[in-house]
Every structure is written in C-alpha cells, then in structure tokens.
Image (cartoon, grey):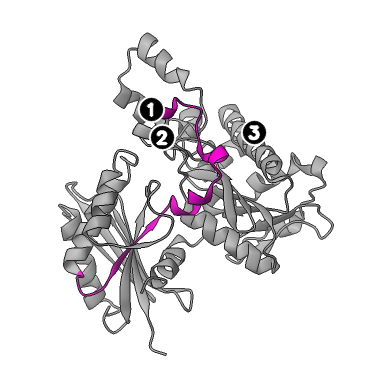
C-alpha cells in the first residue's frame, strides 16, 4: 500500500508547530517549529531523520513562516509529494457546540471558526491565520479541522450547563466546552486498548503547562475540568484554575484593575508562576529539593486541586477503574504521581514505586497487581490523533 501522510499544523499567535505524520504506522516523519513570528528575529527549526536545520532571521507573518517551512521540506526533506501527503490537519481549540468531530475546511467551516473567536480569543484567531495561509499554499490537498472541544460535546447537560441566567447563557453561548479533548480522547482510547477493556470508568489527567482532567465512561466523556475557556479547573503553569469569580469584582473595585489586566493576571501570571515565579514544573521541583517553602506550598496546592477532581469524578461516575497520567509533567514527574497516589491510598490504590520511577516513552501500568485502581502513564500524541481523525474524512 502506498504511504499516506498528514501534515499536522498547530498555529499559535506567534508560532507554528508542525509534524508530518504517517497515521497508519503511528510515526512522525518530520517535525518543526517556527517561533517569534512578527518579532525582529524569528527562529525556525526543522527535523528530518538525523538532520536538524535551524534558521534565524525575520519571519514577518504566518504566511512567510509557512513558506519557509515548505521550502525546508523541499531542501532538507522529506518531499511532501513523494511522502504521500493526502491532507493537512489543523488543531483548533474552540469548536463551540457546532463540531462534535473533525471537519473538512471549506469557506463555511472557516467562517464558523471565525465566528467562535469570542469564545476562544487566545487561540482561534491564531488558528485561522494558519488555516488561511496553508489553504492558499497547499490548495491541492484537503484541509481538516480537529477541535479540542469535540470530545466533550457528549457531556451530559448537567455537566455542561452553568447555573447562570438561562437567557444570558444561551445568548452568549456560555457553557462548559472543555479543552485538550483531542488528548483526552486519544489517551482514554489507548488505555482501553492497553487493558483490552471497553467498560472502563476512567480519569485522565493531562498535566502540562496547561492542565485538565476528564471523566470518561465506556469511551464517552461525562465531565471535564476546563470550562467556557481553558482557564477553569486545575492549577496550571500560568493559569489560576478554579477561583471565586468575585475575585474579578474585588480587583476591579479595590485595585482599579482593567478587565484586560485581570485577564492577563489569571491566564498568564498566576498558577505555579504566580505562586513561585516559575511555571516550569522541573524548576519548581528542584527548588522544593533545595528547601523552598513557596514551591512546596505551590505543589501542595497543585496536588490538593488534583485530589478534589479525582474524588469528584469518582462520585460522578459511581466508581473508578483507572487513573492515567499524561502530558509533560504527568508523563515525567514521578514525584507528582507519587504524591497524588499517596493521598488516595485509603481507596486501596497501591503504587508500585519501582515502576513509577522508571522513565519510558511507552504506555505502562505503575500500580501493583492488587491495587483497587489501575494507575497508568500513557504518553499523549495529539499530532497522531489529529492525523488519524483527518484520515477518517479523506
């Protein structure tokens, strides 16, 4: 069978991440990153096999960045036509209530993504730039949007509905949309395959700089921690997660802060960064080992929030079969996994300390055979998930 590949693009406000994926083999053929778009000096890194090519220089806009990327595919490889590219998959954070799965991008879909910018102001405008440029430069293959919110369209109304005035909520489309859905869907599916069971009550903890939890029953999401935006829920690298909404009113009245300032405060200057000055879990962990009290408190707050969600989702599902850690901190911070699992020992959960301490890129069980809850580490692969979803429409 001729190889078929998908170029996966994740366009940010000043960056473009990309990966050429063979979805059938589950492998990445090439990857790269365009950074500091619009700044005086941009940076591009392209990896193919053992070759890494880096370029520093002006990247005035996303169009210029993507043109340079396509030139690197021609120069360094692999040649996109010879690699059998059949689609371009685009990550889109906010799909609102309109998209419960991937969608072939045409003018109507592109307009709907644009209409949803008020619900995803930090992400959708940047995705649109990437989509518009990519459709222009690669018009000979279909483009597919894969939405972070799609997996959570199945949430029961009781989980998706806020206790806000109904007319206001409906007029302004305020409900729980969730995020990281592509990762949660991929990881929960991998758990089911790994354990050869479809009847699981799962909690997936996606713990990166952005962090979210999901409750998944028989492959369907029934709750998730992120809400109208990715701000709600767990403590994150720069985001507060759950906080009393009245804190906004208090800061407006007492600190005379503008809404834009509070937005920046809650989304970029809080979380681990706000508590410690660092948003990198590895740095926070090293400072804890050095005796830093602020970092120790921050980690306790982080784990406490995780514990609350695990307890709540266990109650929502009426039981719990598995807890899965994924994403940067979830996959690599053995101390974080140990600290959370220690607080769950009352449930009969037993962590295998030796297995927990092993560093691996493979899916694995880290609980003991007699643990009442199976604990796993499953590396997420959102690019592969996007490529596979794109292929379902080709």
Mark 3 neighbour density, 10 Å: few (under 14) some (14–19) many (20 or more): some
Residue 237 lies in magenta, yes or no?
no
- The residue lying furthest to the top in this view is 254
Residue at x 47%, y 44% (from the top left corner): 178
Residue at label 1?
A: 168
Alpha carbons under labels 2 and 3: distance apart? 28 Å
- Element marked by disc 1: helix
Image location (x, y in percent) of residue 380: 52, 60
Pick the quarter of the image with the C terminus: bottom left
Q: Residue 174 has which mark?
A: 2
Q: Which residues are magenta?
A: 138-166
| Residue 357, picture quadrant | bottom right
User: Which is more N-terminal, label 2 or label 1?
Assistant: 1
Compared across the picture, whether 97 is left or right of 236 comes to left
Alpha carbons under labels 3 and 1: distance apart? 33 Å
Image location (x, y in percent) of residue 304: 64, 33
Q: Residue 304 has which mark?
A: 3
Compared across the picture, whether 388 is left or right of 252 comes to right
Mark 2 neighbour density, 10 Å: few (under 14) some (14–19) many (20 or more): some
Image location (x, y in percent) of residue 75: 22, 76
- Element marked by disc 2: loop
């Amino acid at each position: 069978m001729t190889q078929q590949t998908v170029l996966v693009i994740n366009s940010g406000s000043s960056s473009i991440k990309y990966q050429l994926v063979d979805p059938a083999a589950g492998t990445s053929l090439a990857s790269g990153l365009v950074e500091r778009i619009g700044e005086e000096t941009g940076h591009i890194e392209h990896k193919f096999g053992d070759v890494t090519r880096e370029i520093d220089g002006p990247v005035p806009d996303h169009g210029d960045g993507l043109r340079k990327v396509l030139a690197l595919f021609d120069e360094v490889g692999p040649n996109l036509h010879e690699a059998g590219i059949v689609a371009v998959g685009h990550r889109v954070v906010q799909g609102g209530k309109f998209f419960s799965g991937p969608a072939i991008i045409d003018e109507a879909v592109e307009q709907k993504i644009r209409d949803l910018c008020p619900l995803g102001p930090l992400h959708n405008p940047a995705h649109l730039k990437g989509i518009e440029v990519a459709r222009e430069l690669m018009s000979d293959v279909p483009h597919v949007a894969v939405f972070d919110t799609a997996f959570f369209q199945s949430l029961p109304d009781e989980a998706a509905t806020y206790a806000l005035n109904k007319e206001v909520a409906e007029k302004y489309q305020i409900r729980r949309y969730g995020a990281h859905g592509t990762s949660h869907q991929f990881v929960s599916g991998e758990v089911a395959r790994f354990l050869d069971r479809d009847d699981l009550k799962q909690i997936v903890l996606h713990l990166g700089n952005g962090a979210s939890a999901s409750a998944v029953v028989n492959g369907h999401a029934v709750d998730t921690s992120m809400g109208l935006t990715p701000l709600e829920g767990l403590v994150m690298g720069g985001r507060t997660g759950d906080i009393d909404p009245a804190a906004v009113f208090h800061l407006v009245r007492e600190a005379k802060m503008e809404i834009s300032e509070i937005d920046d405060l809650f989304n970029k200057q809080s979380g681990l960064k706000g508590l410690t000055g660092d948003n990198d879990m590895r740095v926070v962990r090293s400072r804890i080992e050095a005796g830093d009290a602020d970092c120790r408190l921050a980690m306790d707050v982080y784990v406490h929030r995780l514990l609350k969600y695990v307890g709540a989702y266990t109650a929502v599902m009426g039981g719990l079969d598995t807890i899965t850690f994924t994403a940067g901190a979830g996959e690599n911070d053995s101390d974080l996994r140990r600290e959370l699992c220690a607080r769950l020992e009352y449930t009969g959960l037993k962590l295998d300390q030796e297995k927990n301490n092993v560093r691996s890129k493979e899916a694995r069980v880290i609980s003991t055979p007699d643990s009442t809850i199976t604990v796993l580490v499953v590396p997420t692969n959102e690019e592969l998930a996007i490529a596979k979803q794109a292929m379902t429409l080709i």
